Image (cartoon, rainbow, N blue to C red):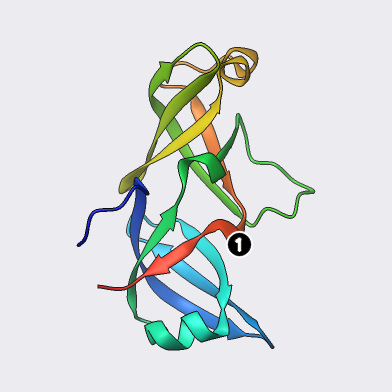
């Protein structure tokens, strides 16, 4: 695998591809057992040869991972991955929160104020919220 700045790389397997006119939604079962949806272009889905059973890595920038203290209803965000806070590194304005998930780890970049307001600490239960349009897919 080549080096890249995207730290969040979750392995999984495609379970469904639903093509639309320009975009496709791709359902992925992560190795840890949770489901993730990616919305990518039809061209990308075809170029990657995505079909049910294709092994993939879901790539998500840490700035695109929001956090909640519980599952959220009434939002358009498709991906809600439950985990626990593994580590928090806070600077003057921003914080890096590592979220331990079954079978992996995610990093979220949020404001230090958000960490304080949510009362997050190591071991806190959290839900990582990720829009489907912010999930990229890679094959090996």
Of 120 and 4, the residue lying toward us? 4
Regarding residue 32, the answer to whether it shows in the image is yes
Of 28 and 1, the residue lying toward us? 1
Q: Is residue 4 above or below residue 128?
A: below
Q: Secondary structure at mark 1?
A: helix
What is the x, y in percent for residue 22? 66, 84
Q: Is residue 93 above or below residue 11?
A: above
- Residue found 62% across the figure and 34% down from its top: 70
Q: Quadrant of the C terminus?
A: bottom left
- Residue found 53% across the figure and 40% down from its top: 63
- Residue found 44% across the figure and 27% down from its top: 97
Q: Is residue 86 above or below residue 45?
A: above
Farthest residue in the left direction? 1
What is the x, y in percent for residue 29? 42, 65
What is the x, y in percent for residue 134? 56, 57
Q: Quadrant of the N terminus?
A: bottom left
Neighbour tally class for label 1: few under 14, some 14-19, many 20 plus, Cα within 10 Å: some
Regarding residue 51, the answer to whether it shows in the image is no
What is the x, y in percent for residue 124? 48, 22
> On the image, numbered disc 1 is attached to which residue?
133
Q: How many marks on residues?
A: 1
- Residue found 62% across the figure and 15% down from its top: 113
Tell me which corner region of the image, top left, top right, bottom left or bottom right, holds residue 59: bottom left
Position of 72 with respect to 96 (left or right) is right
Tell me which corner region of the image, top left, top right, bottom left or bottom right, holds residue 11: bottom left
């Amino acid at each position: 695998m080549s080096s890249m700045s995207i730290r969040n790389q979750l392995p999984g397997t495609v379970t469904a591809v639903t093509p639309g006119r320009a975009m496709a939604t791709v359902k992925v079962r992560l190795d840890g057992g949770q489901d993730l949806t990616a919305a990518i272009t039809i061209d990308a889905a075809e170029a990657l040869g995505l079909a049910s059973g294709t092994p993939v890595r879901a790539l998500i920038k840490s700035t695109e991972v929001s956090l909640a203290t519980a599952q959220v209803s009434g939002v358009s965000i498709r991906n809600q991955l439950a985990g626990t806070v593994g580590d928090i590194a806070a600077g003057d304005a921003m914080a890096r929160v590592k979220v331990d998930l079954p079978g992996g780890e995610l990093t979220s970049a949020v404001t230090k104020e958000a960490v304080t307001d949510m009362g997050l600490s190591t071991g806190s239960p959290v839900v990582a919220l990720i829009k489907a349009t912010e999930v990229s897919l890679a094959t090996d």
